[in-house]
Amino acid sequence: PIEAQVSAVHILKLFVALIIVMFSWSTSSRKGRRGGGDYPGNRANSVAQTIHGTIRPPEFTRQQHLDSYCHDDVLKKSTRKVSVDDSTYDTVFQTTSGDALILRVHFPPPLSESSPSRPPQMTLVGVKATHPWLDRNMRIVGYSSIQSDASWKEARILLGVAVHEVVTHLQLNAPEVLDLTDPGLAKLQSTMGSSRRNMTSSKNKKNPPNYNSLVNSMTPPPPVDMPTIPQQFPDELNSKSREELQVLLDDELEFLSLVRQTPVSCEMKLQRESILDENAKLATSMLERQEEYAILHGQVTDLKESLATKLEEFTAWQQKQDEFLKPPNLSLIQKELNRARKVAFDKSEDLASKWVDFGEGTVDEFCKNFIEQRHEMHLRAAKLERLKYQTETGYA
C-alpha cells in the first residue's frame, strides 16, 4: 500500500507539471506570437512563409521563363517572335550534317494567374524528317521534361534551358531530312549548303584526304601471329614456396626480370623487334619516294583544275545548244511572218506607185520586180495561215 501511494503521488506531480508547461505555452503565445517560446502547434499565423534553406525549389514565373529563352547568350541571336502575343517563337539552328532547321516553340499561357505554367510545345517547321524524338507531325516528343504537365512540373527548369537542351541534341544527333516544305527554309538550306561546300572545298585544297576514306579503300592489314597463351605456370614458380612468391610479388624489379625470362615474353619481344624493323624499312622506302609522290600530286592537281575549267566550258556550250534545240515559240514566229508579209506588200505597192507616177523602167522590168515582191508577200501569208491552222487544230 505504501508503494502504491508513492507511485500515485509521482503520477500526480507529473500531471501537474504537464498542465503548467501547457499553460506557459498558451500565455507566451498570447503575449507575443513571434517570440522564441511559441507553442509549436499554434495555427494563428496561417500564411505560409518562405523558409530559407528549404530543399523545395521555387516556382518560376512566366516572365522568368521567357527571359531565360529570349535573352539566352546562344539562342537570342537566332530567335524571333512569330506570334502577336508572347507565346510562339522560332529558333534557327544548323546541325552537324549541315542542315538548317527551324524549331518553333509555343509556350502557352497558364489557365489562370494562380495555376502553374504549362509545358512548352516544340515542333520542327518547314521540313519533313525522321528522328527518335520526332513524331509524324514533326513535334518533339522524345524530350522527357515536356512530355506532360507533371513531367514539366517535376523538371523545374527554365524554358531557355529546355530549348537549349533540345537544340543541342538535334545539332549533335541530326535528323534525317526527307523533304523541305518551306521555300524560305529551302533557300536558306541551299545558301548554307553552298557555303559549306565552298568551305569544304577550300579546306580540301590544303588538307590531306580524309583518313576514313583511305582506310576504307585500303586492304586490311595482315594478321599478326601472336604466341599461344601458356596453359601452366613456369617451372621456376612451381618450385617456390608461398613466402618466396609473396616476396617476388612485392619486389617489382625481380618480378619483371622473371617475366622477361619466360618463353612467351621472349617470343613477343622478337615479334615486336621484327615489326619495328619492317615499319622502319617501309617508312624509309616511303621517304625515298616522297619527291615522286609530290610530283604526282602536282600533276593530279593540275589535271583536276583543267577538268574543272573544261567542265565550265562544256556547261556553257551545252546551255547554248539547249537554246538552239528548244522548240520554237509559235506566237513569235507568227508575228515575224505577219511583219514580213506587210513589208513585202508595202514594197510592191511602192514599186507600183513609182512606176505609174514616174514611169521608171520598162514594162518587163516592172512586172518582174512586182511579181517577185507579190510572190514573197503571198508566200509569207500562206505560211502564216498554215501555222495558225496547225496551232488551232493541232494537225500538221
Image (spheres, rainbow, N blue to C red):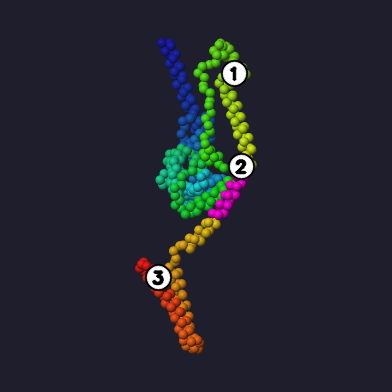
162 or 4, which lies in front? 162
Number of residue marks: 3
Amino acid at circle 3: Leu
Q: From what the image shows, is residue 335 above or below residue 210?
A: below
Task: Name which residue lies at 55% across and 57% down.
Answer: 313
Give the mark nearer the N terminus: 1 vs 3. Answer: 1
Is the residue marked by circle 2 packed among few (<14), some (14-19), or many (20+) residues within 10 Å? few
For the residue labelled by badge 1, is the local secondary structure a helix, a strand or a loop? Answer: loop
Determine which residue is flagged by label 2.
293
Amino acid at circle 1: Gln
Residue 62 covered by magenta stretch: no
Give the mark nearer the N terminus: 1 vs 2. Answer: 1
Q: Quadrant of the N terminus?
A: top left
Task: Name which residue lies at 44% across and 65% down.
Answer: 328
From where the camera sits, is residue 201 visible? yes
Tell me whether circle 1 and circle 2 mark residues in contact (CB < 8 Å): no
Q: Which residues are magenta?
A: 292-311
* Foreground: disc 1 or disc 2: 2
Tell me whether circle 1 and circle 3 mark residues in contact (CB < 8 Å): no
Q: CA distance from mark 1 to mark 3?
A: 103 Å
Q: What predominant SS class does the magenta segment belong to?
A: helix
For the residue labelled by badge 3, is the local secondary structure a helix, a strand or a loop? Answer: helix
From where the camera sits, is residue 106 visible? no
Task: Name which residue lies at 43% across and 74% down.
Answer: 380
Q: From what the image shows, is residue 225 above or below residue 102?
A: above
Q: Quadrant of the C terminus?
A: bottom left
Determine which residue is flagged by label 1.
261
What percent of the width, then of the height, locates residue 147? 43, 41
**Mark linked to residue 387:** 3
Q: CA distance from mark 1 to mark 2?
A: 45 Å
